[in-house]
Amino acid sequence: MVLCMTTISVPVDTDKFIKLVDFLRSKGSDRDPVATISLAIDYWMDNADWKAEELLPEVFEIEKGYMWKEVFLPHGTSLRMRYKNQYHYAVVKADSFLYDGVDMSPAQFANTVTKSSRNAWRDLEVKRPQDRDWVPADKLRGESQKKQIDLDALFNN
């Protein structure tokens, strides 16, 4: 019984392919560069589980985020505050809340912008990666508290 192997063509950047050919030549290898690409795919898949964070960072970035009291802000969340007719923006990157590249809390963000003591829940708006529109932070907090009350009621009955 003869197995018939089918193939598909996958576009590879010409410069990258030429670099691979040059690399193989420089190592004295007579290996077929096309076969080497196939081996590289196998190697990548074999190592994806134990190097998952390195090889699949988008999966791990999704799980990262900043916990602001009872509200989880996933990686990629934007926050804004309007002060003196100007918007100021902060972002959640991995597990950090950043304003102008400085790691701080939402309260510190609001206080830094206004140079006074402010209520960040009242003053900030949030736009998570899944959101289409900006949402007041205090609305998110209320929704989170309601979900917690519903869960408590469900498990305590």
Image (cartoon, helix red, strand yellow):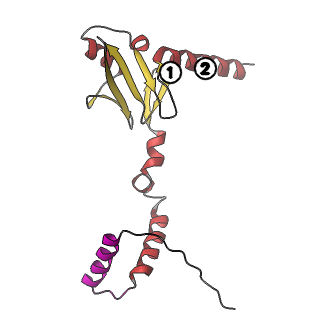
Between 95 and 99, the residue placed more toward the observer is 99
Q: Residue furthest right?
A: 157
Task: Please tell me whether mark 2 sits on a helix, a strand or a loop.
Answer: helix
User: Is residue 36 left or right of 157 when viewed as pictured?
Assistant: left
User: Is residue 40 left or right of 111 when viewed as pictured?
Assistant: right
Mark identifier at residue 70: 1
Can you say which quadrant of the picture contains the C terminus? top right
User: Is residue 135 left or right of 87 when viewed as pictured?
Assistant: right
| Contact check, label 2 and label 1, Cβ < 8 Å | yes
Instruction: Look at the picture and state if 47 lies above or below 88.
Output: below
Q: Which residue is drawn at 46% across and 18% down?
A: 137
Magenta stretch: includes residue 146: no
Mark 2–mark 1 distance (CA, rounded to whole Å)? 9 Å
Q: How far from the left and from the top, in percent, is residue 68?
A: 44, 23
**Amino acid identity at mark 2:** Gln
Magenta stretch: includes residue 26: yes
Mark 2 sits on what residue? 148
**Amino acid identity at mark 1:** Glu
Task: Please tell me whether mark 1 sits on a helix, a strand or a loop.
Answer: loop
Q: How far from the left and from the top, in percent, is residue 98?
A: 31, 29
Q: Which residue is drawn at 48% across and 14% down?
A: 138
User: Is residue 100 left or right of 79 when viewed as pictured?
Assistant: left
Q: Residue at x 37, y 22 (%)?
A: 80
Q: How far from the left and from the top, in percent, is residue 101?
A: 26, 32
Q: How far from the left and from the top, in percent, is residue 46?
A: 49, 66
Q: Residue at x 66, y 22 (%)?
A: 151
Looking at the rendering, which quadrant does residue 16 occupy? bottom left
Instruction: Look at the picture and state if 58 lies above or below 112.
Output: below
Magenta segment, which residues? 14-31
Instruction: Look at the picture and state if 147 lies above or below 115.
Output: below
Instruction: Look at the picture and state if 145 lies above or below 133.
Output: above
Circle 2 packing at 10 Å, graded few (<14), some (14-19), many (20+), is: few
